[in-house]
Amino acid sequence: MTRLSFGLTLIFTAMLLAVPSAKAAEKLGATRILFLTQSKGYVHGSVKRNPQDAGQLAPAEVAMIQLGQQSGLFDCDCTQDAAADFTKENLQNYDIVAFYTTGELPIAAADRDYFVNEWLKTKGHGWIGFHSAADTYRTENPEHSWYWDICGGTFIGHPWGSSRRVTLAVHDPSHAVAQPFGKRFEIQDEIYMYNHWNPDNVRVLMSLDYAGSPTDSTVNAKYGTHVPVAWVRSWGDGKIYFNNLGHRPETWRNPAFMASITQAVKWIRGDIAGDSTPNPEVSRAWEAKSRKDVKEYGFKVENLN
Ligand SMILES: [Zn+2]
């Protein structure tokens, strides 16, 4: 498909599906998702709307709306305006909030506190972070620590650019949220490394395997060589799922990636089980393996201590 015809297809699809689903959200049993795709830093193509027509949704937004409709599982409203829509009042309309964001978002302190201390701790509620959700509230400001805790990691660089094909190891392929990826998952997408990764808080589901992920770029090992890619955690009675994937618009048509989202929604709702007990032993084992692999496979590494 040419770039132009793909663009036209998206426009057409967006026209069919971009109708705000306020009515549909009232459907009995359908989970209501608020998808925030506001970029206060880098703007990814996956969340870039047509500057000539802000009503025309971006590829990731269209994909989420379609996924909800096709699965019958959820209704997804999309916003690029956190100040207007990420509020205590508006959160009452949703079960799950998903972020594909960058930078420092205009979220008021009172709304943030409500979200962290009440809303997200509620049974059946959840937060899903895609890709550059980890490139949000990144600057080293203690005011941002609430977000680092929820997200689980803060972007420091991407030695695997979007032209790289990487191999991801799935630590527990029987976990509901990880199951669509199988035991090993190969994909062309951009892979981050992180600061503020705390293995004691999260259950890591998937990590980059250096053995199948060559790159010419330098790996910054300042905060470790292990490259976690997807993880879950509990937050009170609420749940969190983060997945690094989603840089490329093509990823939003990847069946495994999309299936992991419906699985995550079911898991957050409580329809299916999925352990969120932290597994720091897995992070430790993969730190050791990764340190060995960067040497064995000749990666360029800096800050390795
Ligand atoms: Zn990216």
Image (tube, grey):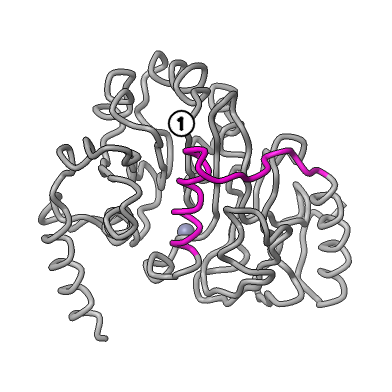
Which residue appears at 26% of the width and 44% of the height? 78
Which residue appears at 56% of the width and 38% of the height? 151
Indicate whether 34 appears above or below 185: above
User: Which amino acid, mark 1?
Assistant: His
Which residue appears at 36% of the width and 41% of the height? 40
The picture places residue 108, in percent across and down from the top left corner, at 36, 19
Is 107 positioned to the left or the right of 130 in the image? Answer: left
Is 266 positioned to the left or the right of 63 in the image? Answer: right
Instruction: Write the start and end of the magenta stretch as one range.
Output: 257-280
Q: Is residue 4 visible?
A: yes
Quarter of the rendering containing residue 39: top left
Q: Secondary structure at mark 1?
A: loop
Is 130 positioned to the left or the right of 167 in the image? Answer: left
The picture places residue 127, in percent across and down from the top left corner, at 47, 37
Q: From the image, which quarter does the N terminus lie in?
A: bottom left
Indicate whether 194 appears above or below 227: above
Q: Report the residue marked by disc 1.
A: 125
Quarter of the rendering containing residue 46: bottom left
Of the pair 180 and 168, the residue shown nearer to us: 180
